[in-house]
Image (cartoon, helix red, strand yellow):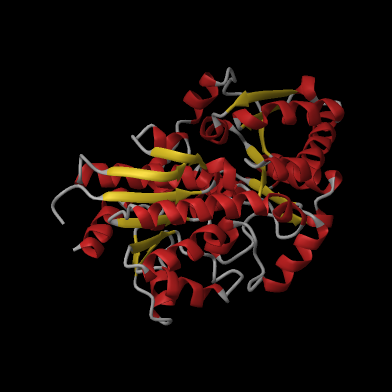
Amino acid sequence: MEHPPRVAMVAGETSGDLLAGLLLDGLRARWPGVASMGIGGPRMQERGFDAWWHSERLAVHGYSIELVRRLWGILQIRKALRVRLLADRPDVFIGVDAPDFNLGLERDLRAAGVKTVHFVCPSIWAWRADRVEKIRAAADHVLCIFPFEPELLARHGIAATYVGHPLASVIPMAPDRLAARAQLGLTADDEVLAILPGSRSAEVAYIARPFFQAAALIRKARTAIKIVVPAVPALRGRIEQIARECGVLESLAIVTGQSHQVLAACDCTLIASGTATLEAALFKRPMVIAYHMHPVSWRLMRRKQLQPWVGLPNILCRDFVVPELLQDAATPRALAAAVQQWLDAPARDPGRIARLEQRFTALHEELQRDTPRLAAHAIAQILA
């Protein structure tokens, strides 16, 4: 197909908006006049995307209580989007992550003759292996961000292409730590802890409190430490409120956005499990991964888990290279102790951080590809 295609896309949440924005860069480079529309966020809109609904409308957390509260609205959005796309069919539909929303929509569009692509293979290698059949019915092609995924999908008759992880090209191999600190008003000698309590409101509701309680304990032991919290703009007020309730608001520097600068600058990060943990790994930073969710959601997830790791750095390294403290284990005291082990490492175990940086550098090299170009080429082959 030589003429610019019409591309419908759905990206859920902040991480999907980032991935879709990079994909749009590749599509625009190949087809300068490409038209794109559907559900997306600010990074997509900056690239000319026509957002019929904002990606934040799809943000949910867990399986049970949280999902039920928002399910009706999400289903109505999907129904309206399906009707609109079938009435005015795009050349290709690309579902970016958000598999619970996208796979069913892709299946219906594909059955009606629309080419479908799913960008980011659902984590069938970690949990929910039952999704394989849904993927096979939904997607003409899957764009994979981890190198082992195409072979796994091929075993199930699903066409796929490894395109690398977009973040591995966005984040420099050797981040400029001093420049990041200068941007944040920090000095080279400061001891810096980054706290990332998540980019979704329900994540912040569950994990921010123990994170800030841990910060209070760390501050007592290390009075000079600088603690920086990058906050999604929509959640900054809620984060400030929880920090105030924990008595640590005055001890924190809360910045709007700037998560990459904060990760580049920090000595260690206390971080909610999710895509941000991979970002921290690509910045070669020591971290403590934690997560907490509704107890019913937690029990359901544990039943479906296929491997011992939850954090992406550990999954990709096939080892517990950084601590994971999940659910009831994520107490303020345990979180504070795990963080301080990293902060004490230069004096007590000088090689520990260097070994971690070597592991993360090797991981970075494995994930670094020209993702926008490779993804656009795969999509062109599908359209052809």
Q: Residue at the far left: name it.
A: 2
| Residue 133 vertical placement versus 204 (above, below) | below
Residue 212 spot, x, y in % from top left? 79, 35
- Which quarter of the figure is the C terminus placed in? bottom left
With 306 as the anchor, is 41 left or right in this view? left
Left or right of 229 in this view: 180? left
Q: Residue 219 falls in which quadrant of the image?
A: top right
Q: Position of residue 363 (x, y in %)?
A: 46, 56
Is residue 160 placed above or below 201 in the rendered structure? below
Image: 116 above or below 33? below
Please name the residue shown 81% across and 42% down the image. 210
Q: Residue at the location (60% across, 71% down)?
A: 128
Q: Position of residue 338 (x, y in %)?
A: 76, 48
Q: Position of residue 328 (x, y in %)?
A: 84, 56
Of residue 316 and residue 124, the one placed in the foreground of this image is 124
* Residue name at image x 75 percent, y 26 percent: 240
The quarter of the image holding the N terminus is bottom left
- Say which residue appears at 23% left-offset and 50% top-offset: 5
| Left or right: where 94 falls relative to 233 | left
Quadrant in the rendering for residue 181: top right
Residue nearer the viewer, 208 or 70: 70
> In front here: 304 or 169?
304
Q: Is residue 170 left or right of residue 59?
A: left
**One can see residue 284 in this view:** no
